[in-house]
Image: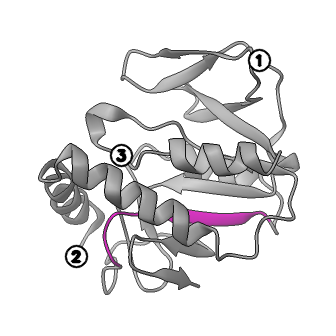
Amino acid sequence: MTKAELRKKHKALRKDLSEDQREELSLAIANNLLSLAIWDKEFYHIFLSIETQKEINTDYILNILSGKDKNIVISRSNFETTTLENVLLTDNTIIKLNAYNIPEPVGGIPIPAHSIDVVFIPLLAFDEQGNRVGYGKGFYDNFLADCKPDTLKIGLSFFDAEPGIDDVYSGDIPLDYCITPNETYTF
Protein backbone atom coordinates (compact mmCIF):
# COMPACT_ATOMS: atom_id res chain seq x y z
CA MET A 1 0.00 0.00 0.00
CA THR A 2 1.09 3.59 -0.52
CA LYS A 3 1.61 6.07 2.31
CA ALA A 4 -1.61 7.88 1.37
CA GLU A 5 -3.58 4.61 1.49
CA LEU A 6 -2.02 3.65 4.82
CA ARG A 7 -2.71 7.12 6.26
CA LYS A 8 -6.38 6.80 5.36
CA LYS A 9 -6.63 3.23 6.68
CA HIS A 10 -4.92 3.93 10.01
CA LYS A 11 -6.75 7.20 10.67
CA ALA A 12 -10.00 5.23 10.28
CA LEU A 13 -8.74 2.47 12.61
CA ARG A 14 -7.81 5.08 15.23
CA LYS A 15 -11.15 6.83 14.86
CA ASP A 16 -12.91 3.54 15.71
CA LEU A 17 -11.09 3.23 19.05
CA SER A 18 -13.09 4.17 22.13
CA GLU A 19 -11.44 6.38 24.74
CA ASP A 20 -11.17 3.38 27.09
CA GLN A 21 -9.48 1.30 24.35
CA ARG A 22 -7.06 4.15 23.60
CA GLU A 23 -6.07 4.39 27.26
CA GLU A 24 -5.72 0.62 27.67
CA LEU A 25 -3.58 0.31 24.52
CA SER A 26 -1.46 3.33 25.49
CA LEU A 27 -0.73 1.79 28.90
CA ALA A 28 0.21 -1.54 27.25
CA ILE A 29 2.65 0.28 24.94
CA ALA A 30 4.26 2.06 27.91
CA ASN A 31 4.59 -1.23 29.79
CA ASN A 32 6.18 -2.91 26.76
CA LEU A 33 8.72 -0.08 26.55
CA LEU A 34 10.03 -1.05 29.98
CA SER A 35 11.55 -4.25 28.55
CA LEU A 36 13.80 -2.32 26.12
CA ALA A 37 17.41 -1.70 27.15
CA ILE A 38 17.16 2.06 26.58
CA TRP A 39 17.00 3.44 30.11
CA ASP A 40 20.69 4.27 30.54
CA LYS A 41 20.48 7.31 28.23
CA GLU A 42 20.28 10.97 29.22
CA PHE A 43 18.00 12.92 26.83
CA TYR A 44 14.64 11.48 25.70
CA HIS A 45 12.48 13.28 23.13
CA ILE A 46 8.76 12.57 23.30
CA PHE A 47 5.71 13.98 21.58
CA LEU A 48 2.73 15.29 23.49
CA SER A 49 -0.43 13.57 22.28
CA ILE A 50 -2.81 15.30 19.89
CA GLU A 51 -6.17 14.38 21.42
CA THR A 52 -8.15 15.25 18.27
CA GLN A 53 -6.04 12.72 16.28
CA LYS A 54 -6.59 10.00 18.92
CA GLU A 55 -2.82 9.58 19.27
CA ILE A 56 -1.25 7.32 21.85
CA ASN A 57 -1.50 8.87 25.30
CA THR A 58 2.15 9.53 26.10
CA ASP A 59 1.42 10.56 29.70
CA TYR A 60 2.27 6.99 30.78
CA ILE A 61 5.71 7.23 29.14
CA LEU A 62 6.23 10.71 30.59
CA ASN A 63 5.59 9.22 34.04
CA ILE A 64 8.17 6.48 33.42
CA LEU A 65 10.75 9.05 32.27
CA SER A 66 10.05 11.28 35.27
CA GLY A 67 10.25 8.32 37.64
CA LYS A 68 13.64 7.41 36.18
CA ASP A 69 14.75 11.07 36.54
CA LYS A 70 15.52 11.48 32.82
CA ASN A 71 15.85 14.71 30.86
CA ILE A 72 12.64 14.98 28.85
CA VAL A 73 12.66 16.97 25.62
CA ILE A 74 9.48 18.14 23.86
CA SER A 75 9.09 20.25 20.76
CA ARG A 76 7.37 23.13 19.08
CA SER A 77 6.49 22.87 15.37
CA ASN A 78 7.69 25.54 12.95
CA PHE A 79 5.29 25.20 10.01
CA GLU A 80 7.24 27.65 7.82
CA THR A 81 10.39 25.51 7.88
CA THR A 82 8.81 22.12 8.81
CA THR A 83 11.26 21.82 11.68
CA LEU A 84 10.92 21.06 15.37
CA GLU A 85 12.31 23.39 18.02
CA ASN A 86 13.24 21.20 20.99
CA VAL A 87 13.12 22.32 24.61
CA LEU A 88 13.65 20.72 28.01
CA LEU A 89 10.43 19.87 29.84
CA THR A 90 10.58 21.26 33.39
CA ASP A 91 8.09 21.79 36.21
CA ASN A 92 7.74 25.39 34.98
CA THR A 93 7.05 24.57 31.31
CA ILE A 94 3.80 26.05 30.06
CA ILE A 95 1.99 23.92 27.45
CA LYS A 96 -0.55 25.43 25.03
CA LEU A 97 -2.37 24.08 21.99
CA ASN A 98 -1.25 25.56 18.67
CA ALA A 99 -3.58 26.27 15.72
CA TYR A 100 -3.49 22.53 14.79
CA ASN A 101 -4.39 21.37 18.34
CA ILE A 102 -0.81 20.21 18.94
CA PRO A 103 0.24 20.71 22.57
CA GLU A 104 3.50 22.67 22.58
CA PRO A 105 5.79 24.37 25.09
CA VAL A 106 5.78 28.14 25.41
CA GLY A 107 9.41 29.24 25.68
CA GLY A 108 11.82 26.87 27.38
CA ILE A 109 15.47 25.85 27.49
CA PRO A 110 16.59 24.89 23.94
CA ILE A 111 18.10 21.42 23.46
CA PRO A 112 19.99 20.76 20.21
CA ALA A 113 18.93 17.69 18.22
CA HIS A 114 22.45 16.22 18.39
CA SER A 115 22.13 15.98 22.21
CA ILE A 116 19.08 13.69 22.08
CA ASP A 117 19.69 9.99 22.73
CA VAL A 118 16.21 8.50 22.25
CA VAL A 119 13.26 9.75 20.17
CA PHE A 120 9.74 8.39 20.63
CA ILE A 121 8.08 8.95 17.25
CA PRO A 122 4.39 9.45 16.55
CA LEU A 123 3.19 7.61 13.47
CA LEU A 124 0.09 6.37 11.75
CA ALA A 125 1.55 3.14 10.35
CA PHE A 126 4.83 1.28 9.92
CA ASP A 127 6.02 -1.75 8.01
CA GLU A 128 8.02 -4.89 8.76
CA GLN A 129 11.22 -3.17 7.56
CA GLY A 130 10.93 -0.26 10.02
CA ASN A 131 9.64 2.31 7.54
CA ARG A 132 7.02 4.65 8.96
CA VAL A 133 4.08 6.72 7.80
CA GLY A 134 3.33 9.96 9.63
CA TYR A 135 1.07 12.85 8.72
CA GLY A 136 3.13 13.62 5.61
CA LYS A 137 4.69 16.99 6.42
CA GLY A 138 8.25 15.73 7.03
CA PHE A 139 8.77 17.26 10.49
CA TYR A 140 10.26 14.08 11.94
CA ASP A 141 12.41 13.31 8.89
CA ASN A 142 13.91 16.80 9.15
CA PHE A 143 14.37 16.46 12.91
CA LEU A 144 15.88 12.95 12.79
CA ALA A 145 18.32 14.03 10.06
CA ASP A 146 19.77 16.51 12.60
CA CYS A 147 20.10 13.91 15.37
CA LYS A 148 23.32 11.97 15.88
CA PRO A 149 23.59 8.68 13.93
CA ASP A 150 23.21 6.50 17.05
CA THR A 151 20.07 8.22 18.33
CA LEU A 152 17.50 5.48 18.96
CA LYS A 153 14.31 5.94 16.95
CA ILE A 154 11.30 4.27 18.57
CA GLY A 155 7.90 4.31 16.93
CA LEU A 156 4.72 3.93 18.99
CA SER A 157 1.71 2.32 17.33
CA PHE A 158 -1.68 0.98 18.37
CA PHE A 159 -1.55 -1.43 15.43
CA ASP A 160 0.79 -4.13 14.11
CA ALA A 161 3.19 -3.74 11.20
CA GLU A 162 2.03 -3.58 7.60
CA PRO A 163 3.87 -5.95 5.21
CA GLY A 164 5.40 -3.06 3.27
CA ILE A 165 5.09 0.56 2.18
CA ASP A 166 5.19 0.95 -1.60
CA ASP A 167 6.46 4.52 -1.86
CA VAL A 168 9.38 4.74 0.60
CA TYR A 169 11.93 7.28 -0.57
CA SER A 170 15.60 7.86 0.26
CA GLY A 171 14.90 10.74 2.68
CA ASP A 172 12.74 8.55 4.91
CA ILE A 173 14.53 7.66 8.13
CA PRO A 174 13.56 4.19 9.40
CA LEU A 175 12.89 3.13 12.98
CA ASP A 176 15.15 1.10 15.25
CA TYR A 177 12.14 -0.21 17.19
CA CYS A 178 8.38 0.03 17.12
CA ILE A 179 6.31 -0.72 20.20
CA THR A 180 2.70 -1.88 19.92
CA PRO A 181 0.40 -3.13 22.70
CA ASN A 182 1.20 -6.72 21.70
CA GLU A 183 4.71 -6.72 20.30
CA THR A 184 8.12 -5.08 20.22
CA TYR A 185 9.52 -4.88 16.69
CA THR A 186 13.28 -4.59 16.25
CA PHE A 187 14.73 -3.44 12.93
Q: Earlier in the sequence, mark 1 or mark 2?
A: 2
Quadrant for the C terminus in the image: bottom right
User: Mark 3: which amino acid?
Assistant: Glu
Which dot marks residue 42? Answer: none
Are dots 1 and 2 in contact, CB under 8 Å? no
Q: Where in the figure is residue 116, as x and y percent of width and height?
A: 81, 50
Say whether residue 13 is left or right of residue 56: left
Say whether residue 148 is left or right of residue 159: right
Q: Nearer the viewer, residue 78 or 181?
A: 181
Tell me the quarter of the picture where residue 50 sits. Answer: top left
- For the point 73% across and 38% down, which residue is it? 73
Q: Residues within 10 Å of mark 1 (few under 14, many from 20)?
A: some
Residue 6 drawn above or below residue 114: below
SS at badge 1? loop
Residue 46 drawn above or below residue 118: above
Question: Can residue 172 be seen here?
Answer: no
Q: Earlier in the sequence, mark 2 or mark 3?
A: 2
Are dots 1 and 3 in contact, CB under 8 Å? no
Residue 74 drawn above or below residue 4: above
Q: Where in the figure is residue 46, as x and y percent of width and height?
A: 62, 45
Label 2, on which residue? 1
Q: Nearer the viewer, residue 29 or 80?
A: 29
Label 1, on which residue? 108
The boundaries of the magenta stretch are 151-160
Q: Marks 2/3: CA distance?
A: 22 Å
Q: Where in the figure is residue 123, as x and y percent of width and height?
A: 42, 56
Which dot marks residue 55? Answer: 3
- For the point 74% across and 40% down, which residue is it? 72
Q: How many marks?
A: 3
Quadrant for the N terminus in the image: bottom left
SS at badge 3? loop
